[in-house]
Image (tube, coloured by chain):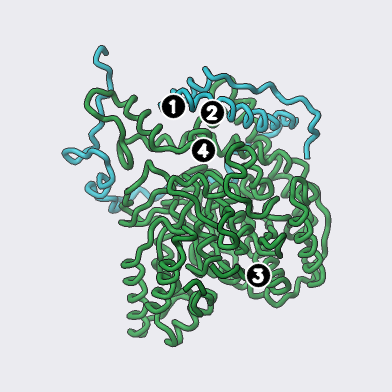
């Protein structure tokens, strides 16, 4: 296990930062959740920041354990999911499409 | 009432043999398991959905095929429980989340399609932590599953429903998915077998995505041979998954049979110094050491290996998995499937989306989405996600070095036995520690299995066998050998 006395990168996350993250992630969190999450994320971030203790300057990153690249199928027509099946779980299908709430605000 | 019937205590191999010989029908086998579920699941809550009609029809089809003289697969007619993270055509699939409540998928996952093609009978969908994020099923939006060994304790997670259904004799087989230990840790704490195949050895098509570079479907069973037989059914290349490995499946069934002879002469077991008990309960360490002695008596040679970066696997995982989850779960936007909240005509899309996700996701999923959003944001990316990916490389190198002197690596599966409900939910990081020993194999993409190795204070302990990539057969051989020397524990009657 790593040396626990090593300094860790400064973590720490404020309530305001959590509010910003929630906005980026499209989560309409409550004020109470902001307090809870700020404390919990702070603990988690301090723990995971220990990856910074590893000297890994020239080490290539691994995004994926399987070394496959450019996996393509043959460019041949094949049956796909029928439209009514694709729409079967939609909360508000209309005219064979997904209906969405308006995308722009009134003033835009 | 609470005693399992004879049919429900048999192994999958035993049931398949009886069905093939015509000594019992697939319909009778299925009915026995459905009856068992009906008699016990109000106490265990392993299932979110029981497909009584679908299971009866599938079983009748197997009986008809046999009557017509058609060849049957090795597990034809055997019931199987499916983790509710896999899509099942027409059968509700929630992934343990309110955001997918009532959703009926328009297609089968590859795993489920292969089960059906092989004549297995899908009994229903099992409980899990929401979107497979957790180690106890306490994060399921539909309430936790209870451990058949002690109904006041967790069954592990995320796939606690699948493993509990085996320990409760509700199903002889189950499928799960393992991103950081979600098959192996529930297997360990319920006294059952759970295997994570090589990443890419089983298809992710139709497995609802959590962390795409880690998610791996795999088998759960009460015996190693049954797990191997199920592995052989679901594994193999799938063109629908671009990360599926286009190579033959290792002979896991043959390896399990070879291991069951109890001969491990010439097999080198690597005892990982960094996973040898740090942070583990004394009873877990004691059971593990006794199991190592038993393996030695079977002829195996134990060598100590060092994997110096394994201590950083947990932090790296809890950056990589949340990062991928924050991206994957962006698809739940209230447009194409699932919940939509607040669409009263006055609100714009973005607000409806935020209200939908706030209402549909539970606290652990929100925490991980925000953690991943943070780790991927500019300014923090290099220090967190980028650094975690480099650590991932170093962990894979540690494995490679260790496998130069050992055929497989061994460790306890999880540091602690099944804990009481509520013990680890107040501090999320305490829950994460359940994955301490299982995560390295996920980061490296290599296979690993958990097999029962005894009890600690009356509760099951699991031993983990880790093998090199695409050498899944090796772990089955060692696990089956251990099973022959240390018979799996029998859970108490419910």
Mark 3: secondary structure: loop
> Who's cyan, chain-wise?
A
Q: Gap between marks 1 and 2, in whole Å?
A: 10 Å
Q: Gap between marks 3 and 1, in whole Å?
A: 46 Å
Q: Which residue is mark 2?
A: A37
Q: Colour of chain B?
A: green
Q: Are marks 4 and 3 on the same chain?
A: yes
Residue B165, percent from left and from top: 50, 63
For this view, does A67 lie left or right of residue A94? Answer: right
Between B273 and B74, the residue placed more toward the observer is B273
Q: Which residue is mark 1?
A: A29
> Can you tell which mark lies on residue B488?
3
Q: Which residue is mark 4?
A: B364
Crowdedness near tag 1: few (<14), some (14–19) or many (≥20) residues, C-alpha within 10 Å? some
Q: Residue at x 41, y 55 (%)?
A: B48
Mark 1: secondary structure: loop
Q: Is residue B262 visible?
A: yes
């Amino acid at each position: 296990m790593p040396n626990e006395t090593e300094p860790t990168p400064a973590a720490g996350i404020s309530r305001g930062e959590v509010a910003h993250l929630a906005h980026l992630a499209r989560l309409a969190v409550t004020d109470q959740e902001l307090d809870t999450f700020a404390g919990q994320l702070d603990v988690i971030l301090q723990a995971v920041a220990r990856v910074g203790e590893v000297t890994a300057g020239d080490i290539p990153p691994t995004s994926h354990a399987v070394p496959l690249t450019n996996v393509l199928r043959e460019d041949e027509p094949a049956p796909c999911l029928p439209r009514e099946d694709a729409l079967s779980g939609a909360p508000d299908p209309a005219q064979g499409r997904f209906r969405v709430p308006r995308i722009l605000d009134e003033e835009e | 009432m609470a005693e399992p019937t004879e049919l429900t205590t048999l192994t999958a191999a035993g049931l398949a043999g009886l069905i093939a010989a015509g000594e019992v029908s697939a319909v009778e086998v299925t009915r026995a398991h459905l009856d068992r579920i009906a008699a016990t699941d109000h106490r265990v809550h392993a299932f979110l959905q029981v497909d009584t009609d679908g299971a009866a029809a599938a079983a009748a089809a197997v009986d008809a095929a046999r009557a017509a003289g058609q060849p049957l697969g090795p597990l034809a007619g055997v019931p199987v429980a499916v983790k509710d993270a896999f899509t099942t055509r027409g059968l509700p699939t929630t992934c343990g989340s309110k955001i997918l409540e009532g959703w009926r998928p328009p297609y089968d996952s590859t795993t489920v399609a292969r089960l059906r093609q092989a004549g297995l009978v899908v009994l229903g969908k099992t409980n899990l932590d929401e979107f497979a994020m957790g180690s106890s099923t306490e994060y399921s939006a539909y309430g936790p599953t209870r451990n058949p060994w002690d109904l006041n304790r967790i069954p592990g997670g995320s796939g606690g429903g699948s493993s509990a259904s085996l320990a409760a004799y509700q199903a002889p087989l189950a499928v799960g998915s393992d991103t950081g230990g979600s098959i192996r840790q529930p297997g360990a704490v319920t006294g059952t077998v759970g295997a994570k195949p090589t990443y890419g050895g089983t298809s992710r098509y139709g497995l609802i995505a959590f962390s795409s570079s880690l998610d791996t479907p795999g088998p759960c069973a009460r015996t190693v041979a049954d797990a191997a037989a199920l592995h052989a059914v679901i594994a193999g290349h799938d063109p629908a998954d671009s990360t599926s490995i286009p190579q033959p499946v290792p002979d896991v069934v043959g390896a399990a049979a070879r291991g069951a002879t109890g001969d491990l002469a010439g097999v080198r077991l690597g005892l990982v110094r960094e996973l040898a008990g740090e942070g583990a309960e004394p009873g877990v360490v004691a059971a593990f050491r006794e199991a190592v002695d038993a393996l030695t008596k079977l002829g195996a040679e134990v060598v100590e290996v060092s994997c110096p970066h394994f201590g950083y696997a947990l932090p790296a995982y809890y950056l990589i998995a949340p990062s991928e989850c924050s991206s994957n779960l962006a698809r739940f936007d209230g447009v194409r499937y699932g919940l939509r909240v607040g669409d009263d005509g006055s609100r714009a899309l973005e607000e409806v989306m935020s209200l939908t996700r706030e209402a549909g996701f539970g606290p652990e999923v929100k925490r991980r989405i925000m953690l991943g959003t943070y780790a991927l944001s500019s300014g923090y990316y290099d220090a967190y996600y980028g650094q975690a990916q480099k650590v991932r490389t170093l962990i894979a190198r540690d494995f490679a070095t260790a496998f130069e002197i050992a055929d497989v690596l061994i460790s306890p599966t999880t540091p602690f036995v099944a804990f009481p409900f509520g013990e680890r939910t107040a501090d999320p990081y305490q829950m994460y520690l359940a994955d301490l020993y299982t995560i390295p194999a996920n980061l490296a993409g290599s296979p690993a299995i958990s097999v029962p190795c005894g009890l600690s204070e009356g509760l099951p302990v699991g031993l983990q066998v880790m093998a090199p990539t695409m050498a899944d057969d090796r772990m089955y051989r060692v696990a089956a050998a251990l099973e022959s020397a240390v018979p799996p524990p029998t859970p108490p009657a419910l």
